[in-house]
Amino acid sequence: MTASSTPATLVVGSGGFLGRAVRRAAVEAAPGTDVRAASVPWDDQDAAVEALVTAIRGVRTPDSPWRVVWCAGTGVVATGAEVFEAEQQLIGRVLETLAGDEAAPGTLFFASSAGAVYAGSSPAPFDEDSEPAPLAPYGRSKLASEARFRTWAESTGARLLVGRFSNLYGPGANLGKAQGLVSQLALAHLEGRPSSIYVPTETTRDYLYIDDAAAMVLDALDTTERSTAAGTAVTKIFASGRSATITEVVAAVEDAFGEPLDVRHGADPSATYQGLDLRFASRVLPTVDARDFTDFGQGVRNTVDALRAARI
């Protein structure tokens, strides 16, 4: 899609792992296109609501098509329910404020988590028809957010694309969050400390390289806008379709460093929230998956190289 035909786009959560990659990919795909970042004071809910409403109204106007790509999210699998309650309240306030606005047709994208949503589901691999079975407040909150955005889209006539993502990895991950096995293993090794693993080493995940994920989001938005009626919600799993066990992930990181890691096994209450087999096989928008995905070993090497460079 060219810059002239791409709707004005707002990325919410552009400072995060996925949001930053989507914004970068959107600018590179169509130079000159109107791609904006929402600057949000997340620690102050009233100020955050005001900033989000203002930013969304900046692109969601009566005059031309628009896109809002919501990649912001609170917490990780081990986060307590009270944090997600505040997030739900914020999303509800923003959507309620915007509901009565006059606006041209547009598309809202919400980044959800396949791993959290299907953590207790069976059997793998999971597709969009699999019954969600979250094990943690994180997954239940993602489903609640999906429902909020779906109701809003239906009532306002917007298209909604819900993206349920498998495990994202690659350069630029938020190292302050207790997630992202590839980055956490590499960071621990660079800092000369052991890595702790709290789940069985045969635990299996689908790993999706961050640049592949961002490109898929843009392709899925283009496809949705061409083929989906206003007021319609589409849910798609974003995954590579290729999985690795923890043992294989450790081996890939060791290969990138050319030396063994100090990996130790421990116990943590959050381990009960983890599904053991999270393989995916998306059936929705299949053209989006028809691509050459980044080789896992190469993606791990890219991640290690980026972390090394950041420490120089």
Image (cartoon, rainbow, N blue to C red):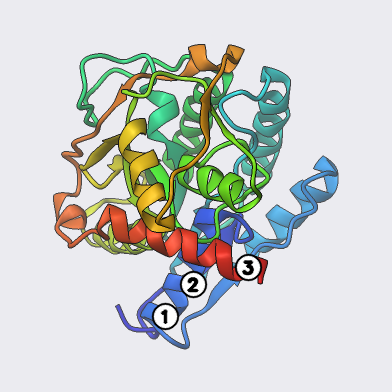
Q: Nearer the viewer, residue 170 or 225?
A: 170
Residue at label 2? 24
Q: Nearer the viewer, mark 3 or mark 2?
A: 3
Q: Earlier in the sequence, mark 1 or mark 3?
A: 1
Instruction: Give the SS element for disc 3.
Output: helix
Q: Residue at x 75, y 47 (%)?
A: 49
8 lies left or right of 53 = left
Total marks shown come to 3
Q: The residue under label 1 is which amino acid type?
A: Glu
CA gap, disc 1 and disc 2: 6 Å
Residue at label 1? 28
Residue at label 3? 310
**Do the residues under discs 1 and 2 have CB atoms within 8 angstroms?**
yes
269 lies left or right of 54 = left
Q: The residue under label 3 is which amino acid type?
A: Ala
Q: Residue at x 21, y 25 (%)?
A: 129
Q: Earlier in the sequence, mark 3 or mark 2?
A: 2
4 lies left or right of 93 = left
**In the rendered image, which quarter contains the N terminus?**
bottom left
Q: Residues within 10 Å of mark 1 (few under 14, many from 20)?
A: few
Instruction: Indicate which disc residue 222 carries.
Output: none
Percent of width and height locating residue 139: 49, 24
110 lies left or right of 284 = right
Q: Is residue 49 visible?
A: yes
Q: Residues within 10 Å of mark 2 (few under 14, many from 20)?
A: some
Q: Nearer the viewer, mark 1 or mark 3?
A: 3
Percent of width and height locating residue 20: 55, 63
